[in-house]
Image (cartoon, rainbow, N blue to C red):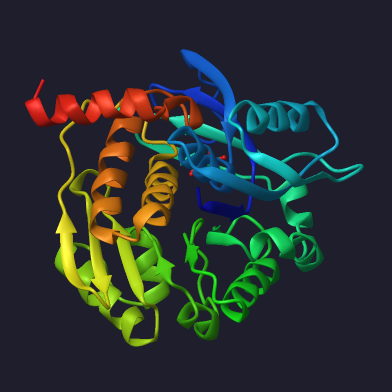
Amino acid sequence: MSKIAVIGSNMVDLITYVDRMPEQGETLEAPRFAMGCGGKGANQAAAAALLGADVLMVSKVGDDAFADTTLANFKRLGIDTRFVERVPGVSSGVAPIFVQENSHNSILIVKGANAHLEAADIDRAEAILRNCALIVLQLEINLPSVYHAIDFAHRHAIPVLLNPAPAVAGLSRKHLSQLSFLIPNESELALLSEKPVNSPQAAAQAARSLVAEGVRHVIVTLGEQGALYVGEEGEWRVDGHKVQARDTSGAGDAFIGCFAHHWSQDGNIRKAMEQAVAYSACSVTGLGTQSSYPDATTFARFVAALKTGS
Ligand code: RIB
């Protein structure tokens, strides 16, 4: 089985379900709270692992009980943690998340130990990274480390996927041009391309400008509208699925983890996108981030039900 490496963040999600967000200076009672394992990197690794991928995580946890929770979770999922290190005297990454009744979310992140993942940590994993089918990156670790990972992947001709989240303006064009896959959502795409993205047509236009700058494959996640591909294989759209959404937190990460798993199996981009659109639709029907990700069996049942319309 080909190995996927995720070089990136882990967080503990502190999720409060709210009827509405409080105004400044207001105290408001919220109906429900849940804690779960999150962080964009860890979520993507978890989704891939749940579907059966062999996943290596390169990440940093802090010096607290949250670190134990995260490490135990990686182990439970069968994720290779030999390059997940503790940083003494530093907190783990945490993400207070607020989910409103309409299922939409607002997220704050405190990077904590994630800000201590350095180029040297990536180099330490070189021998195993060189044998990976895909390296997956996000932007919850420091940018120089992300650039170092892209340079490393480029130097060794390892396919590299960047999910540019959370959105950061002014990413290095040289590094963007070295990517195999760039998978932004609409707002991340608008920031990166410096073009308005308010429709699938506008998204295609903006994605084309990044392909013209050298990215081989741009995949734009469009939420409930599915996803769009623009790149050296042409252009197409995979339609979304109508589901009863309860919590959209982590749906983008579900897409990336599922895409990475399927693409690394056979290199079929369209098929991997179809699976990823369905997997992220399934994830929004549950609560929380990783807690809403199905394993391969549950996902197969969800896909079968989509086909029969039940
Ligand atoms: O993409 C969702 C994730 O963003 C959450 O799990 C949270 O930890 C933040 O990293």
| For residue 82, above or below residue 281 | below
Quick check: 71 above or below 125? above
Residue 256 vs 143, above or below: the answer is above
Q: Which residue is drawn at 53% across and 86% down?
A: 174
Q: In which quarter of the image is residue 21?
A: top left
Residue at 36% x, 67% y is 189
Residue in the foreground of this view, choosing between 217 and 63: 217
Outermost right residue: 89
Q: Which residue lies furthest to the front in this view?
A: 1
**Residue positioned 69% across, 58% down in the render:** 128
* 293 left or right of 2 in image: left
Q: Quadrant location of the C terminus?
A: top left
Say which of 308 and 280 sits in front.
308
Figure label count: 0
Residue 26 as seen in the image, left or right of residue 278 = right
- Answer with left or right where residue 217 lies relative to residue 52: left
Q: Where is residue 187 shown, x and y percent of the image?
A: 36, 60
**Residue 33 visible within the image:** yes
Residue 151: image x %, image y %?
63, 78
Q: Where is residue 35 in the image (x, y as percent from the top left)?
A: 59, 22
Residue 226 on image: x %, y %: 22, 49
Q: Residue furthest top?
A: 31
- Relative placement, left or right, of 9 versus 220 is right
Does any portion of residue 101 appear in the rendered image?
Answer: no
224 vs 158: above or below: above
Q: Residue at x 44, y 39 (%)?
A: 250
